[in-house]
Image: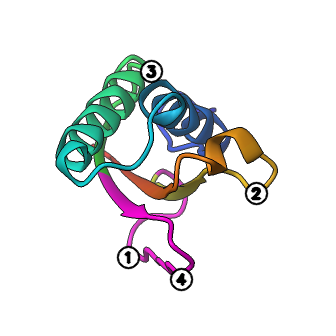
Amino acid sequence: MSDYGFDAEVVEPILKQALDEVLKQESYADARVPAFVDEICAKAMEGLADLGLPIKFVVSCTVMQSNGSGLNSHANMHSDARSDGCVMVKWPEKRNREAAASHMCCIVTAAGFAV
């Protein structure tokens, strides 16, 4: 990672860790979804801030019950490709059968803009 730019290879593990910490032991419950979203965004933002980069981050999170319906998401932005970026992480990963038993899926997006 450069001293000032967005690096998806550094950001993605932070998002995955936030997702695992919050959702790994949980099952879908409508009443808990707002708390899940708040916790995931807070943990992700904390990890991103700990990088100490001169970047403004925006984190968004969608949690939905996994009941066979599809969930598609896309993020796009007009920015400076040399210093800004965006990464999206889906949870659970297809190979994680244990997490798939939670009956929920989540997408977290982080965008970073150099200041």
Checking the image for residue 43, the label placed there is none
Q: What residue range appears in magenta?
A: 60-83
Image point (63%, 32%), residue name: 1
**Horizontally, is 77 left or right of 69 in the view?**
left
Spatial separation of the CA atoms under disc 2 and disc 1 = 30 Å
Q: Specify few, some or many for label 2: CA neighbours under 10 Å numbering under 14, 14-19, or 20 or more.
A: few
Say above or below: 43 vs 91. above
Towards the viewer: 5 or 96: 96
Percent position (x, y) of residue 11?
54, 38
Mark 2 or mark 4: which comes first in sequence? 4
SS under mark 2: loop
The residue at which mark 1 appears reads as 78
The residue at which mark 4 appears reads as 70
Percent position (x, y) of residue 25?
51, 28
Mark 4 or mark 3: which comes first in sequence? 3
> In the image, which is nearer the foreground, mark 2 or mark 3?
2
Q: Main secondary structure of the magenta part?
A: loop
Image point (24%, 54%), residue name: 30
Spatial separation of the CA atoms under disc 1 and disc 3 = 23 Å
The residue at which mark 2 appears reads as 94
Mark 4 or mark 1: which comes first in sequence? 4
- Residue type at mark 3? Leu
SS under mark 3: loop
